[in-house]
Every structure is written in structure tokens, then in C-alpha cells.
Image: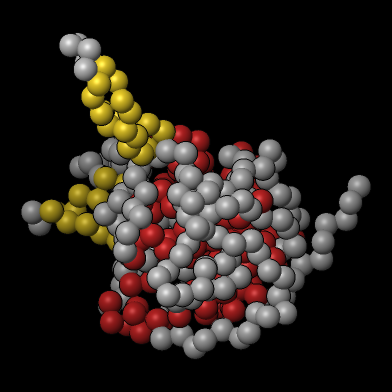
Amino acid sequence: MLADSRRLFTYRSIFIGLGATAALASGGFAAAKSTSSMPLGPTLSSDGAAAVSTDPPTVSESCLAQTICSVKERIRWQTPAWTPSQCHRIADAVSASAKRHNLNPSLLLAIMVNESDMNEKAAQVYTRDGRIYAKDGGLMAIRCILDEHEHCTNGNVRGVAWKDLMDPVTNIELGARELAGWRDGGGVMKKTIVKRDADGRLQRVTKKVACTHKTHAYWAHYNHGPYYIDKGYPRHYPHRIAVLDHALATVMNIPAPELSGRITMHDPGRRERTVDRPLEPRYRKLYADIMSGGTCSPLALN
């Protein structure tokens, strides 16, 4: 699935039924409007793990559905708009999966926006020796390695039929499960320790241990796979998701505790990346689209 470390590109360029040239034509976005009057988020860096709250933030169903419909209308790429009932169905699924896996609804939506532009039919086909062996698909870009009966054979989706995986509610749940898995020990990192060998001599030994996410936000693994990639283009994935998460949390008037804490994202010769400052054209456009959709009223306190 998307968590495979080899998949380092976004869905905007791979919609089935659209040529790569047509899909990439949407990449020439205008710069977003100034955000100087918007609330500032914490600095995002890749040298401190994001905090995880005990309970996920709560957002009203009507606000969540309103936000989903608004964002979908602004970012959809040659795909039909969703009806209010469709937006409510997606909102129910996001809310239920967020609660089940202790995730912020805004983070789930951020990944959905990034991976598929909220296109429930988005899919990428992989072939080997002239036959299809895997597909990535749906709102959350779930990877499915197929058997001869169109069922998945990999990881958390083992046994799931491709057609069922593409159901939006199922797809959101599978994506949430995968994201929580990376947060809760699914990622790995290499650690070097010193130990004595059989002859009593000290030796440096490298072993795999559970990733502590100290150099990146845990959702990096949703794209990178078990190992965080700290060089080149992929290292910016955590910041891009954080930018979308921040914007969505802002318009839904909910906290985003996963964005707190020290996390470094430095580019040589540039200002530090922050969650309210998208840098790449696509993310400036997405950020502006989300922020221009209106803000929900804060939830009333009981």
C-alpha cells in the first residue's frame, strides 16, 4: 500500500482514466493568499515526536460534513461533486475511525486530501511480466497485492476483496488502522549498541528496534513504510501532511495536539518549515482552498 517505501509520489498524477499530462496540468497552482492574520501553529521539525492526546479531538458531525463537502468542491479534479448525503457518509466514517483508533479527524482528512484529492475512485495499477499484481486505491490510497481472485494478500488488508477495499467507509477504516499501526510501533529504526562477543571483546552491533519517531512525525511512515527516509524529496512528506492537518483543524475549530512538540524540518538556506506556511505550489493551493471554505462554530461546552 501507500506505506510501501518505494511509493514516493502523489495521487494527483496517477488517476486511472486520466493521462499523466492532464493530471499534472493541475499542478500549476497560484500562490495562496497571505496567512499573516491566521492563527499560527507550532513549528514542525523532524527531530521530535508529535504528541498524541489521550482522547482525539471532538468535532460535530455537521461541521465535519460541511468541511468535507466544502473541501471536496474546491479540490476535486475532473470528478463529480459529492451530494450532502455522501459528505455525511464520509463524515460518519471519518468520525468513527478516528475515535476507534484515537486519531484526530483532521489528520485523517489531511491524508485523504493528500493521497487522493478526495477521489474515492482514485487507483494506481502496478504490472509485472504483463499482468497486474498490485493496486493502490481509494480515498486513503490503500495498497493491495492481488491474488488471482482479486483479493489482497498483504498486511492488514489480507483477505479483503479489492471491490470491498474501494468502498469509501472500508477504505477510511483501513487507512486509519494503518496510520495508528505506524504510530504504535509499526515503524522501525536501526540502533547501534555495544555488547561483548563470546570471547569477551566489545563489539558494535546494529539491530532493528521500534521507531520512536524522534526525527519525524509518525505519519511519515504512511508514505515511507517501516523506515523513515531522511534525505531528498520524501523527507518533506510529514510537513505537507501537517500543513493540511493544521488548515483542517483550524476551519473545524478543533485542536491538533499531534502537531505539538518539537519536530525539526530545516531546509538549507531557508526559513524553518512551520505548519501554517506551506512551501510547494500544490500545498499552498490546497491550504488556501481549505482555509477559504469557512470556519465552523466552536462546540458548545456542556
Query: Considering only vertical position in the picture, is 292 above or below 220?
Result: below
The residue lying toward the viewer, choosing from 186 and 203, is 203
- Residue shown at 40% from the left, 70% from the top: 268
Residue 141 vs residue 240: left or right? left
- Residue shown at 50% from the left, 58% from the top: 264
Q: Answer whether residue 274 is visible to the viewer in this image.
A: yes
Query: Considering only vertical position in the picture, is 61 above or below 70?
Result: above
The residue lying toward the viewer, choosing from 72 and 54, is 54
Q: Percent from the top left, x then y, of residue 266?
A: 46, 65
Question: Residue placed farthest to the bottom in the image?
Answer: 30
- Residue shown at 37% from the left, 66% from the top: 10
Q: Quadrant of residue 11?
A: bottom left
Q: Percent from the top left, x then y, of residue 151?
A: 30, 41
- Residue shown at 31% from the left, 33% from the top: 192
The residue lying toward the viewer, choosing from 52 and 125, is 52
Total marks drawn?
0
Residue 201 vs residue 208: left or right? left
Looking at the picture, the colour scheme in use is secondary structure
Question: Residue placed farthest to the front in the image?
Answer: 201
Q: Answer whether residue 175 is visible to the viewer in this image.
A: no
Residue 219 vs residue 3: left or right? right
Q: Percent from the top left, x then y, of residue 181?
A: 47, 38
Q: Percent from the top left, x then y, of residue 279?
A: 48, 75
The residue lying toward the viewer, choosing from 83 and 234, is 234
Question: Residue placed farthest to the left in the image?
Answer: 129
